[in-house]
Amino acid sequence: MQTLGDIGELAAIERITRGLPKGQKVIVGPGDDCAVVRPAENASEDLVLTSDPVVAGVHFDTDAAPEAVGHKAIGRALSDIAAMGGEPRWALVDVVAPASTPVSIVDGLYAGMGALASDRGLAIVGGDMAEGPVVEIHVFAIGAVPVGRALLRSGASLGDRLFATGALGGSRLGRHLRVEPRLEEGCFLRDWATAMIDISDGLASDLHHLTDMSKLGCDLNLDHIPISDAARRLEGEEAPLDHALYDGEDFELLFTVPQSRCEPFVAAWRAAFELPCADIGCMTSEPGIVRCLHEDGAESTLRRNGYAHF
Ligand SMILES: [Mg+2]
């Protein structure tokens, strides 16, 4: 018997999406950070739709503060909206929990969700509850972008420069619970970026999603990759750079800007944000191939696997 673990997440998604019913006014279906739909022919805005589960024992430790878990659940969905250049609008939340769950935990989850949602202009407009073996939160969120302006993974062109916000790696030291969705930055990038994705599974994995969808490759300058302090603090077999490449749950933005616009882009970014933004590579013509350029001039090919869901 073949299991999800045997075939892996990507094959599972491909298998599922093959048979999905198609609708009208679907601008982008499965395969991006959000789906994009146009509510009416003459609409001024497209809607971007995403859903995301967080599950006890998988996405958070059972002893994590419920407020932090609620924050993370909303933050993950907001990060996907940010990756489309969207502005948050509405969300539905389902909570699954055992009957033995203290009510104070549920209160804490909703306090964490409510605080981040209201801070970022996301209205929680409903949802459902069910009994289940462990605590799970499922967030379905909707954002909006001016019509035709959603930033897709597929939009990069040959020669575009690749940028990443913030610093990467080591999220397991706590940052994964303190997701800071890059919403303002995402909206700002509507005027600059050609393609965008948020880094949830790890730079290596998410960069491959971007190159695959754009049908391009990438030359990645390893010494330009911003490495977080947490990644440097993590001791073990892996180097800090490997944490930055493979850990995941950074919830930073990874995007491309045309070479000819990089100089004004960098100046505009610096004027708008304190958050660093690093130029880490260049889009190349060989589809799906990410070549690592090492500081000493050596080259290698980047392996794909960041966080795998099965
Ligand atoms: Mg995403």
Image (tube, grey):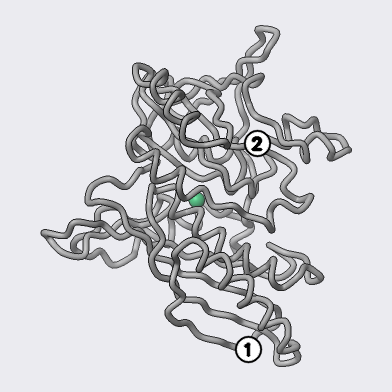
Q: Amino acid at mark 1?
A: Glu
Q: Which mark is residue 252?
A: none
Residue 308 locus on image (x, y percent): 63, 50
Asked where in the image residue 223 lies, by quadrant, the reply is top right
Q: Crowding at label 2, few (<14), some or many (≥20) Cα neighbours within 10 Å?
A: many
Q: Pointer 1: what residue?
A: 131
Residue 219 locus on image (x, y percent): 52, 19
Disc 1 CB within 8 Å of nearest ligand 1 atom: no
Label whose residue precedes the other's in the sequence (2 or 1)? 1
Residue 209 locus on image (x, y percent): 48, 40
For the C terminus, give its image quadrant: bottom right
Query: How many numbered markers are drawn?
Result: 2
**Residue at (73% x, 32% y) in the render:** 242
Q: Amino acid at mark 2?
A: Ala
Give the residue at the far front of this rendering. 271
Asked where in the image residue 280 lies, by quadrant, the reply is top right
For the N terminus, give its image quadrant: bottom right
**Residue at (57% x, 67% y) in the render:** 53
**Residue at (36% x, 23% y) in the render:** 258
Helix, strand or loop at disc 1? Answer: strand
Residue 54 locus on image (x, y percent): 62, 67
Give the residue at the far bottom of this rendering. 99
Q: Which dot, 2 or 1, sits closer to the camera? A: 2
**Residue at (68% x, 62% y) in the render:** 59
Q: Which mark is residue 167?
A: 2
Residue situated in front as seen by the camera: 182 or 297? 182
* Mark 2 → mark 1, Cα distance in angstroms: 38 Å
Q: Is residue 203 above or below residue 15?
A: above
